[in-house]
Every structure is written in structure tokens, then in C-alpha cells.
Image: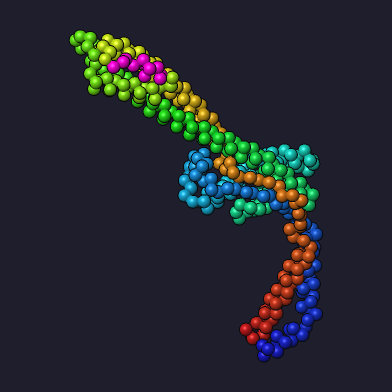
Amino acid sequence: MLRDEILAGFHRWPVIVAFALAGTLLGLVFTYFWPSSYRANVELSVELNPYRVLDDQYIPEFSKAEFRNIDDYKHWQMLQLSIVVKSDPYLIETLTRLRELHPYWDSIEMQDVREMLNAKWRNAGQWLVVADAENSLRAVEAVATWRDVILDLTNDSIAHSRELFNLELTLRSLNDELVINQLHGAALEETLGSLTNAFNELNNAEGNFPLSEHDRVDLFTLANQLAESISGSRLIVEEFPDDGAPVSDYSTWLERAILIVEIDIDSSEVANVALNERISSVTSEWELGINEAQGLSATLSLKKPQNKEPEVRQVRSYSLAALIGTLVGLLLWFLVFLVQITRKGYL
């Protein structure tokens, strides 16, 4: 019966032990002749203020994407950082520094370094920087050097991001100033038109009679508007002709007022040209800085946690190899046992 065969099989426990020991021995031999690599890891503190999503205008320009909520922005920043730290400049710098530490790295190529290094993360907070190498010392060298390169180069990019943010504030200020100046120029043009029309009407008038009260109030209103809109033009009001003055006095006053307005319009146009040139210069500087910032936020912060040295372990230790070998040996015994009872017709 099948039950008897099973009991008989387990009563032959020395055979089971022999299979298990043989598997253990094979696992140890395999590990001895094909030793496992070593894995070193070290923590890296990554902090981000995601509430600046609407302030970092250069990031949508860099990513060609719009971020509608904080989570999307935060995830994109972490993903971008993970791409940046494994980019060619980071790996080249890492390999250069490693070759200064030990001749072993002279034979290592950049592709080898790319496969050796990895950064594990779920979100902002604690990242785990990992390196695999043939021995523990090389693994520690790789992970520690890469961590230092990440800190140095990323902080440089973040510094460029902060410069971009300051440039954006400057651009906003310059554009606001340009709009205000353009509105001021438009108002001056309108006032100049009113002054010119009044001057032409008075010149076409016959006689040198006193100005009507209505016309005098209209001109005095223009004088007050000019005094408010043109800096240092209070003299326009002070020189306004007295009540009952003849038309010729008002014509003389209008000539002076028109000249003052024309000078201020010219100054406003010169200021507009200078503002446009400044805006163009800052915009060019901003566009050049986008690539140097690599899409990283100005609020991103990377730090090395205190008292956190690299931890190293063997990826496939002798104990693990022995355990796996034992399990393989037991599985092999079980397969042999199944073959035996199948031949006897129990299955």
C-alpha cells in the first residue's frame, strides 16, 4: 500500500540525511569555486519641499510636463534624481575618483560601474545607495565614492536651480516694471494729445481774451494729472496762468507742458528699450541654466546622515549556500522516492 511505502521511505532516514548532506556539500563546493559578490550600502538623506510646485517654473520647461498636484511633482523629482545620479557625468566622476584610490579600478569600465551601482528609494526621505563588487573592500570603496559624488554634483545642480529661481523672480520684477512703464507711456501719449489739441485750438482762436472758466478747469485738470504722473513736474501746476490771464499765457504754458511731456515720453521709451534688453539677457541666462540644473528643485536637499558608515555583506554566503544545497538535496530525494513508488504502481 502507498501508506506503507511512505512509512518505509521515512524510516530509511539515513538515506534522507545522505541526500541532504550531499546537497549541503555541493552548495559549499559551488560557493568555494564560484564565490559570491559583496554588497555594500549606505543611507542618503533626501528632502524636498513639494509645495513649491507652482514656483519652480523652470521644471515644467525642463520636463515638458505640467504638474497638477503635489504627489506628481514629488514623484517626478525623485525619479529625475534617480536618473541623474546614474548619468554619465556622475559615473565618470565616480570612476575617476575610484582609480585614484586603487589600481583595481583601472581595468573597470564605465559600463561595469553602471551595473555595479544602484539607488533604492520609495519616496523622499531615506535613500539606500548600493554597490556590488568582487570583495568587501572594493564594494565599500564604490558605494562611499558614489555617495560623495552624488552629494557634490547634485548640490551643484541644486545651486543652479536656486539661481534659476532667483532669475525667475528677477524676470517677474522686470516684466512688471515694463508693463507699468508701458502703461505710463500710454497715459503720457494720451495726455500729450490733449495738450496738443488745446494748444492748436488756442492758436487758432482770434484775439487775446481771457480763457473761459470751463476751458481753464480742463487745462488745470491736465496740469494736475501731469504733476502726478511725471516726477518733479510740480512746476507745471505752479506756473499755471492765473484766473483772467489771456490766451497767450496759456499758449506759452502749454508749450512748456508739451515739451516736458515729450521729454518724459522719450525717457520712457529709452527705459523700455533698456528693460527689454535686460529681460532678453536674463531670459537667455535662464535658458542656459535649465540644463545645468537638470530639472532638480531648488528646495531639494541631499545630506549624509551622521555616523552612517557603509554596511557590507556577502550576497550569497556559505550558510545560505549550505541551506539551499540542503533543500535541493531533500528535493532530489523526494523526486527519487516518487519515481520508485510510481514504478511499483502506487501512483
Which of the two residues, 126 or 5, is positioned nearer the viewer here? 126
> Residue at point 71% right, 41% down?
95
> Residue at point 76% right, 54% down?
311
Image position of 316 (left or right of 68): right
Q: Assign the C terminus to one quadrant of the image.
A: bottom right
Magenta stretch, residue numbers: 233-243
- Above or below for 269 versus 87: above
Image position of 90 (left or right of 219): right
Quarter of the image for residue 29 reads bottom right
- Above or below for 261 versus 54: above
State whether the magenta stretch is mostly helix, strand or loop: loop
Which of the two residues, 266 or 69, is positioned nearer the viewer here? 266
Which of the two residues, 125 or 243, is positioned nearer the viewer here? 243
Q: Position of residue 139 (x, y in %)?
A: 75, 50
- Above or below for 113 versus 174: below
Q: Tell me which colouring the rendered structure shows.
A: rainbow
Q: Is 234 a magenta residue?
A: yes
> Residue at point 72% right, 53% down?
41
Image position of 105 (left or right of 253): right
Q: Position of residue 43 (x, y in %)?
A: 70, 52
Which of the two residues, 254 or 96, is positioned nearer the viewer here? 254
Q: Position of residue 229 (x, y in %)?
A: 39, 24
Q: Assign the N terminus to one quadrant of the image.
A: bottom right
> Residue at point 24% right, 14% down?
210
Q: Position of residue 62 (x, y in %)?
A: 51, 40
Q: Is residue 296 visible?
A: no
Q: Is 298 a magenta residue?
A: no
Q: Is residue 177 visible?
A: yes
